[in-house]
Image (cartoon, rainbow, N blue to C red):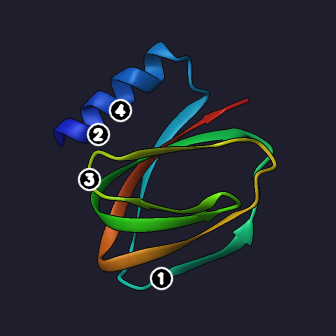
Amino acid sequence: MPVYEERFREDMARASADAVSTWANAPGDLYAPHSHPYRKVLCCLEGSIVFHVPTGDVRLGPGDRIEIEPGSRHSASVGPDGVRCAEAHFG
């Protein structure tokens, strides 16, 4: 397991996350604006992704994290090399 993923899973277990999963997307994939009823913490494991949040764009590369609060509208754009992420849900 890559070091960023192992560290993220350990941190999220200590924080009592409800669930932790991984996912990947191809270069240039887009996520339309949406929100979730739970708090999400996401860690980029490989590649890059840009989250478009109300306060501006947040670019994540390997090892970077973002926390998205429940009900916060966001979208995302996958970088030129694709992306693989781990995410945890709370509540």
Alpha carbons under labels 4 and 2: distance apart: 5 Å
What residue is disc 4 on? 8
In the rendered structure, are the residues bearing label 3 and label 4 in contact, judged by CB atoms less than 8 Å apart? no
What residue is disc 2 on? 5
Residue 51, given in percent of the width and then of the height, sits at 54, 64
The amino acid beneath tag 4 is Phe
Alpha carbons under labels 3 and 2: distance apart: 10 Å
Instruction: Establish if 10 lies above or below 3.
Output: above
What residue is disc 3 on? 62
Quarter of the image where the N terminus is located: top left
In the image, which disc is placed on residue 49? none
Instruction: Establish if 16 lies above or below 70.
Output: above
Label 3: which secondary element: loop
Label 1: which secondary element: loop
Mark 3 or mark 1: name the one nearer the start of the chain.
1
The amino acid beneath tag 2 is Glu
Mark 3 or mark 4: name the one nearer the start of the chain.
4
Would you call the spot at circle 4 few (<14 residues within 10 Å), some (14-19), or many (20 or more)?
many
The amino acid beneath tag 1 is Asp
What residue is disc 1 on? 29
Alpha carbons under labels 3 and 1: distance apart: 18 Å
